[in-house]
Amino acid sequence: MTFLDTIKRFSPDKVKEIIYNASPKDVKRALLQDKIDIYDFMALLSPAAEDFLEQMAQNAHYITQKRFGNTILLYAPLYISNECSNSCLYCGFNVKNKINRKTLTIEEIEKEAKFLYYNGFRHILLLTGEAPDRCGIDLIEEAVKRLSHLFSSISIEIFPLTVDEYKRLIKAGVDGLTIYQETYDKDLYIRLHPRGKKRDYVWRLLTPERGAKAGMRRIGIGALLGLSDFRIDGFFTGLHALYLSKRCWQSLVTISFPRICHAEGGFRPLSPVSDKNLVQLICAMRLLIHDAGIVLSTREREGLRNNLLPLGITQMSAGSCTMPGGYTGQSRDSAAQFDIHDRRSPQEVYQYIKRHGYDPVWKDWDAAFNEKDEI
C-alpha cells in the first residue's frame, strides 16, 4: 500500500461536488467535533465555510496552543544551485528561461551558511534546481558534511531520490525532506511539466514515503497554491498529510502553503488564491491534523504573515533569499526562483514574534537526541 492506492479512492470530480455542495449545517457539525474526519474537512474547505472563518480561526488557535504552545521555529532557505533540466511553466528556474545559472562551490556554500549561522539560524533548508548532472548528490552530500557542525538541523528540498540515496544523505547529516507535489491534479500536472524528470507524477507523489522509509525525521509537503482550485488541492494535501502521519508515524509531518509569486517567465496563477482563501485553508488543515507543523514562508507579505501567526503557524522562514549566493553577494547576477514579499531581517521577525507573546526559537532539535547510550 502506498499513497497512490489511497488517492485513487477519491475521484476529484466527486471531491469537488461534495465540497461545493456542503451546507452551513455541515460546517457547523464539523466545528463541533473534537477531531474531524475527511468529510468534515471537505465541509471546512467549502464556500459555505467562509462565513465561519472566525470560529475556525479560534479553534485552530486553541489546538495549536494545546499541541505546540507558543513556540515558533525560525529557519532559512539556502539555495546552492539554480541550474535545472525541467521546464515547469511556473518556475523561475525553468530550463527555457534565459537566466544566469550558478551552482555554488563548497567554499561558497560554506560562506552562505556562515552568514545564516551568524544571523542566529540553526535550522536551514538546502535547495537546488533539478539538474543532477551539474548539482548532484555528491555535491549535496559534501555540502551537508561541511555544514553539519554549524546547524542542529539540515533539511533538503531537491530533486526526488531513491531510498538508498536518502539514506546516504541522512548519514551525512540531513534530517528533513521537503517535497511539494505542486498540484494533485494529474492532468494539469502533466501540462505544467512538459519536459524533464519532474514530469513523472507518480515518482514525485511517492517521494515523501521513500524519505520516511529512509529515516527522515521530518517530512514536509504542500501544493503550490494558484495552479489548481485551492479547495481541491487543499483536500488532497490534507489527505496526503493524514496518510503520512499514520503510515509514516516515525516522521514529523509539516505542511506548507506556498502561493505563486512573480518569477522569471511571467507565469500568472491559473486559479488565484486570496488572503481569505489562505486563512480558510490553514485553519481547516489545523483542524484536520492537530500534530502537523504548519510552515509559512516569506512568499507572503509582512502584514499578512503577522496576522496569520495565531492561526496555527509553527515554523516561519525569515530574511530569505531565493538565489544561489544571494546572502553574501557572491552571485549578484544569478537569478532567483521567485520574488519574496517579507523583506524583514531575521532579527526583525524574531522581535515581532517575541513582542506578540510567542516564543521564537532558532533551535528545537539536536542530532544528539538520536544518539544511543552505550551499555
Image: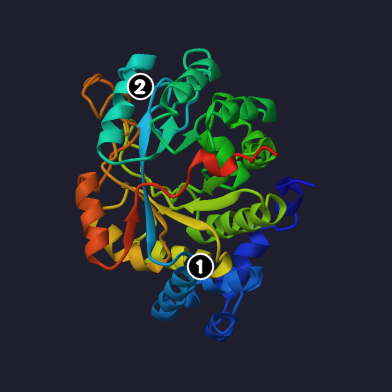
Quadrant assignment, res 112:
top left
Mark 1 touching mark 2, by CB under 8 A? no
Going by the numbered disc 2, the residue's amino acid type is Ile
| Image position of 88 with respect to 12: above or below | above
Indicate left or right for 317 with 240 as reference.
left
30 or 72: nearer the viewer: 72
Q: Which mark is residue 333?
A: none
Q: Residue at x 42, y 80 (%)?
A: 51
Q: Is residue 160 visible?
A: no
Cα separation, mark 1 vs mark 2, equals 36 Å
What is the residue that sits farthest to the right in this orientation?
1
The percent position of residue 274, horizontal first and vertical second, equals: 35, 60
Indicate left or right for 125 with 374 as reference.
left
Disc 1 designates what residue?
A: 67
The percent position of residue 245, horizontal first and vertical second, equals: 64, 55
222 or 173: nearer the viewer: 173
| Image position of 200 with respect to 104: above or below | below
Q: Residue at x 50, y 30 (%)?
A: 158
Q: Secondary structure at mark 2?
A: helix
Disc 2 designates what residue?
A: 109
How packed mark 2 is, by other alpha carbons closer than 10 Å (few <14, some 14-19, many 20 or more), is many
The percent position of residue 350, horizontal first and vertical second, equals: 25, 53
Q: Residue at x 58, y 36 (%)?
A: 190
Going by the numbered disc 1, the residue's amino acid type is Arg
187 or 91: nearer the viewer: 91
Q: Tag count in the figure?
A: 2
Q: Secondary structure at mark 1?
A: helix
The percent position of residue 279, horizontal first and vertical second, equals: 39, 66
| Image position of 279 with respect to 128: above or below | below
